[in-house]
Each structure stands twice: as C-alpha cells, then as structure tokens.
Amino acid sequence: MTYIEQFEQELVKKLQGTEEPAAIVRWVSEEVVKSYRNGIATGQKGAQMMRKGESRKGSLPAQAL
C-alpha cells in the first residue's frame, strides 16, 4: 500500500468518525508538511522521486466529497 493510499484510508476514517473538523485539518496539515520534508530530504540525497500509476488529479473518494 502506498503512502497516499494509507493517507486516504486514515482521512476517510477521520471524516466518518467523531473527530472535530479542526483536529482533522490540523492532522492533514501535519501529514502534508511531513511528506513535503521527506520529499526534500530524498531530493537532497540525489534520489529521483518517480510516481507509478495513473494521475490522481480529480479523483477524490466519494466519502470525502
């Protein structure tokens, strides 16, 4: 399972649960920053970040809408 798939699963659980919207937004912000920093660290080591599969633009899970 990819990072994005794991992120989607966790987000859907949080959206369907009883968490406060502010807590969900804070969690998403932290995850995005963590992912961004990991990407920068990977790029600094000279590794190329290649994404396999189809583009995910415009394909949010129905539960998130």
Image (cartoon, rainbow, N blue to C red):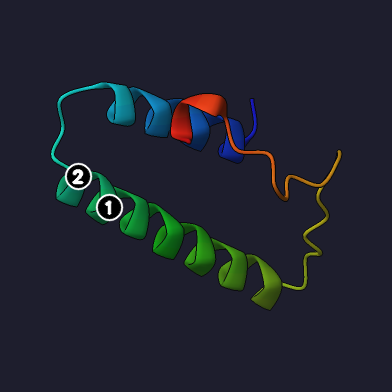
Q: Is residue 3 above or below residue 31?
A: above
Lateral position of residue 58 relative to residue 17, left or right: right
Residue beneath the point at 78% across and 65% down: 47
Q: Is residue 44 above or below residue 14?
A: below
Residue 25 badge: 1
Q: Residues within 10 Å of mark 1 (few under 14, many from 20)?
A: few
Q: Is residue 52 above or below residue 11?
A: below
Give the image location of residue 9, x and y in percent: 47, 25
Q: Which residue is outermost to the front?
A: 65
Q: Which residue is outermost to the bottom?
A: 44
Residue beneath the point at 69% across and 47% down: 58
Q: Quadrant of residue 48?
A: bottom right
Which three-letter amino acid code belongs to the residue tagged 1?
A: Val
Image quarter where the N terminus lies is top right
Q: Are marks 1 and 2 in contact (CB under 8 Å)?
A: yes
Give the image location of residue 41, x and y in percent: 57, 70
Give the image location of residue 34, x and y in percent: 42, 59
Q: Quadrant of residue 52?
A: top right
Residue beneath the point at 50% across and 58% down: 35
Dot 2: element: helix
Lateral position of residue 18 relative to residue 50, left or right: left
Dot 1: element: helix
* Closer to the camera in the image, 47 or 51: 51
Lateral position of residue 23 relative to residue 31, left or right: left
Q: Residues within 10 Å of mark 2 (few under 14, many from 20)?
A: few
Which three-letter amino acid code belongs to the residue tagged 2?
A: Pro
Give the image location of residue 31, x and y in percent: 39, 52
Residue 21 badge: 2
* Closer to the camera in the image, 43 or 64: 64
* Closer to the camera in the image, 45 or 61: 61
